[in-house]
Amino acid sequence: MSSTLQVITELQSDHYLVTATVLSGGTLPLEIFIYENTGTDALGDFFGTCSVEELGRLQIFTGIPIPTFGNRWCRYGQAKIKVDLKDDPNFVSTVLVTNVTILSKALQTKITTSTNYLIA
């Protein structure tokens, strides 16, 4: 089953705000976006999209502080990216879609394995 990435671009007073969310019901986990962990009840700066390895390693931020020692980054279910008015927000959308597609394909190759064993 495929997943759906919803990307919304809004014009704010002095920037564009690009918001990306993986909609439930697909094969991708919802929390695939990486943020800096501040150790508080607020997220730090957006960093990028998870790799397969980071999905298993990074904690999910739920609003409860995560200690920063050994946890510089955390996962979250939404990417919020500010884009200067002079820049193209569609470029950000394209990069997000590309990175999420790469993650989805990588997960699909990890999920399905087939091994034949010769039994004597």
Image (cartoon, grey):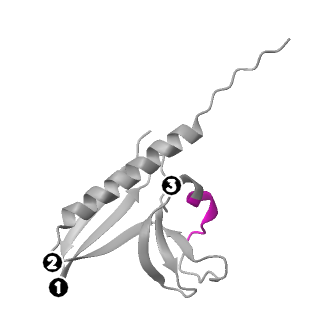
Question: In the displayed image of the protein, which residue is found farthest to the top?
Answer: 120
Residue occupied by mark 1: 14
Labelled disc at residue 119: none
Q: Would you say residue 110 sits in the magenta stretch?
A: no
**Place of residue 8 in the rendered image (x, y in percent of width and height, measured from the top left):** 25, 65
Element type where label 3 sits in the image: loop
Instruction: Give the left or right position of residue 85, taking residue 101 as reference.
Output: left
Quadrant where the image shows the C terminus: top right
What residue is shown at x 50% (from left), y 44% (from top)?
106
- Element assignment for label 2: loop
Alpha carbon separation for disc pair 2 and 3: 32 Å
How many other residues sit within 10 Å of disc 2, few (<14), some (14-19) or many (≥20)?
A: some
Mark found first going from the N terminus, 2 or 3: 3
Q: Residue at x 66, y 82 (%)?
A: 69
Residue shown at the point (20%, 67%) measured from the top left: 89
Three-letter residue code for mark 2? Leu
Q: Which of marks 2 and 3 is in front?
A: 2
Q: Give the range drawn in magenta.
A: 54-60
Q: Quadrant of the N terminus?
A: top left
Residue picked out by circle 2? 85
> Disc count in the image?
3
Label 1, secondary structure: give it.
Answer: loop
Query: What separation in Å lies between label 1 and label 2 (alpha carbons)?
Result: 7 Å
The amino acid sitting under disc 3 is Pro
Pointer 3 residue: 29
